[in-house]
């Protein structure tokens, strides 16, 4: 296919589904250290007009996510504009403007009636929120306090049942709390989850999609604070009215800090580079000094709006494109030494080893098993991610071999339309394996989500109507699970230790909460942006769960 045809596919089949309204919308961001992720993700899906009130240099989390090339720019806005243009070369007429982060500039920006203001809750939070409310501009303001309160998003929409002065009071109170330093590596995943939460909320506001799960609490009931994350469950979600803030703050506990020093540089293997490509971009450098990426497919015109690849990568094999992107992020100036070892093409620089392999590792392919064994012998992974898609479940052969070798692994997948996503966690040789759970749980057999005709056509036409607003939460929760699973067993956070001890190893996350046709919550998740875990107690008789598993376990005994 030629560049012209790819462009045609983007405008005919991708943009109409991800939202034509974005092409006309305008967004203002207060602080790119928080907002870079939403700004870049929305630009990739066609939000061309953005104003960034930010004066800082590229460093910290911004550089960890976007890459070390960004430090070559004087200000974050310049680096981000370069990234946006580079990622989506099909769009033109960009208006990506950076101005100083002064209240004067903010008032001037709001006078032009933008569609949303995405702001970090900083010491000027109350003034920033007051300006948005006075201008009638929908607001998403995010706080990540140092005490373990998770991420708190204050969402103000014109017409909300919450009085403006109560909203401002809440902003003022949250601004007084010490904030977590999101530039620290140990807080990076907390920061990513807070940023993608803001992206999902901004995306909802910009697209104007019907979302009863957000409209009821945030607008009709005036519960304008969305709190996500608790010490015992990183994805617990609650909507609070400002009056309930006292209770929340009174229960604040010290935060769990991931002991990254205990990771001892896992050797990471990632097979299947769809949504997992986003995982790789953040995991390289943060979790591992050796990463091998494996896929046989090429980048398609549907990928840049929801995976790490840019429109320039379309047509290239995913493994090669990702390796190229990662070298730019990890060390653009380095002299990357190349070598080959079995199926793996290595790029090595300093202490980092990056491998790429173009392999189709599904049982249907002749020789796949031998190739897998050769790959594992070269990679010797301590942690693997296996996400080869769910149209035909291609993951069984690989996960069975990882299980045999006692290698810890996670198998991420998405449900139709990426309304929900799922990660099956296998703790090496202990607990249930992928085959124990996959296809045998109530979530695998229930009714599907409501999709529009266009979405349905896109999904069943072999792709999914998802954008980064839906795939980032999946990638970021995968990143947290991978980090925590890679820890020595005794150092894992309590939530993971508890779930694995109870053999609940299937984590299902939601981008939206929706009632299925039977009146039950779809996939058992009753709040947007939350996660629930399923395990052996949720196996369904009649799905094949009664047979002894390929790993040797007997999970469901006849009564
Ligand atoms: Zn099993």
Image (spheres, rainbow, N blue to C red):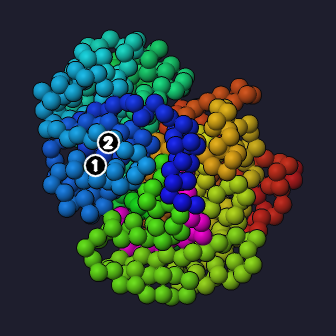
Q: How dense is the environment of label 2, judged by Cα within 10 Å: few (below 14), some, or many (20 and up)? A: some
- Name which quarter of the figure residue 2 lies in: bottom right
Residue nearest the observer in this picture, 61 or 483: 61
Quarter of the image where one finds residue 231: top left
Considering only vertical position in the picture, is 414 above or below 64?
above
Quarter of the rendering containing residue 347: bottom left
Q: Are marks 1 and 2 in contact (CB under 8 Å)?
A: yes
The x, y position of residue 531, in whole percent, is 54, 42
Residue count near mark 1 (Cα–Cα under 10 Å), binned few <14, some 14–19, many ≥20: many
Q: Which percent across, then down, holds residue 316?
A: 51, 67
The answer to whether residue 267 shows anywhere in this view is no
Q: Residue visible at 28% across and 48% down?
A: 81
Which residue was labeled with disc 1?
Answer: 81
- Is residue 5 at all visible to an observer of this figure? yes
- All told, the count of numbered labels is 2
Question: Where is residue 401 drawn, in percent x and y?
Answer: 66, 75
Q: Which residue is mark 2?
A: 94
Residue drawn 56% across the image and 42% down it = 12
Residue occupying image coordinates x 69% and y 47%:
461
Q: Earlier in the sequence, mark 1 or mark 2?
A: 1
Compared to residue 59, the image places residue 294 above or below, namely below
* Local secondary structure at mark 2: loop
The boundaries of the magenta stretch are: 285-303
């Amino acid at each position: 296919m030629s560049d012209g045809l790819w462009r045609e596919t983007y405008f005919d089949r991708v943009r109409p589904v991800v939202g034509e309204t974005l092409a006309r919308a305008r967004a203002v961001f207060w602080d790119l250290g928080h907002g870079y992720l939403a700004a870049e993700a929305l630009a990739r899906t066609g939000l061309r007009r953005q104003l960034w009130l930010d004066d800082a240099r590229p460093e910290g989390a911004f550089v960890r996510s976007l890459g070390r090339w960004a430090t070559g720019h004087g200000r974050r806005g310049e680096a981000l504009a370069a990234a946006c243009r580079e990622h989506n070369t099909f769009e033109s007429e960009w208006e990506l403007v950076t101005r100083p982060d002064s209240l004067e500039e903010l008032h001037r920006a709001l006078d032009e009636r933008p569609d949303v203001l995405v702001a970090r809750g900083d010491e000027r939070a109350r003034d920033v929120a007051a300006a948005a409310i006075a201008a009638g501009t929908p607001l998403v303001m995010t706080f990540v306090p140092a005490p373990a309160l998770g991420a708190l998003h204050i969402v103000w929409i014109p017409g909300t049942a919450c009085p403006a002065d109560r909203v401002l009071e809440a902003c003022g109170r949250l601004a007084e709390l010490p904030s977590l330093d999101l530039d620290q590596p140990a807080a990076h995943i907390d920061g990513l989850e807070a940023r993608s939460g803001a992206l999902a909320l901004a995306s909802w506001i910009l697209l104007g999609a019907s979302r009863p799960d957000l409209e009821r609490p945030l607008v009709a009931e005036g519960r304008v604070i969305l709190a996500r994350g608790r010490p015992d469950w990183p994805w617990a979600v609650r909507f609070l009215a400002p009056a309930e803030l006292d209770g929340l703050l009174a229960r604040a506990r010290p935060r769990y800090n991931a002991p990254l020093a205990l990771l001892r540089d896992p050797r990471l293997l990632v097979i299947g580079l769809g949504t997992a490509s986003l995982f790789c971009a953040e995991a390289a450098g943060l979790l591992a000094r050796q990463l091998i990426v494996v896929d046989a497919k090429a980048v398609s015109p549907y990928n840049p709006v929801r995976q790490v690849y840019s429109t320039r990568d379309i047509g290239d094999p995913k493994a090669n494109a990702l390796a190229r992107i990662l070298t730019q992020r990890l060390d653009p100036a380095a002299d990357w030494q190349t070598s080959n070892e079995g199926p793996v093409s290595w790029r090595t620089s300093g202490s980092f080893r990056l491998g790429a392999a173009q392999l189709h590792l599904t049982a249907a392919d002749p020789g796949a098993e031998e190739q897998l064994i050769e790959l594992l012998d070269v990679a010797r992974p301590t942690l693997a991610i296996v996400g080869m898609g769910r149209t035909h479940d291609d993951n069984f052969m690989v996960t069975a071999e990882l299980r045999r070798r006692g290698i810890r692994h996670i198998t991420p997948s998405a449900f139709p339309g990426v309304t929900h996503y799922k990660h099956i966690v296998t703790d090496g040789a202990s607990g249930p394996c992928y085959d124990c759970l996959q296809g045998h749980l109530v979530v695998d057999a229930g009714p599907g989500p409501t999709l529009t005709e266009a979405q349905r056509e896109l999904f069943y036409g072999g792709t999914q109507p998802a954008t980064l607003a839906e795939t980032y939460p999946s990638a970021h929760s995968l990143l947290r699970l991978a980090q925590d699973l890679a820890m020595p067993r005794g150092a894992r956070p309590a939530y993971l230790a508890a779930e694995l001890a109870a053999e609940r190893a299937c984590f299902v996350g939601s981008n939206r909460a929706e009632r299925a046709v039977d009146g039950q919550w779809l996939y058992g998740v009753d709040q947007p942006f939350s996660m629930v875990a399923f395990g052996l107690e949720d196996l369904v008789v009649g799905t094949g769960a009664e047979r002894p598993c390929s790993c040797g376990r007997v999970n469901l005994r006849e009564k």
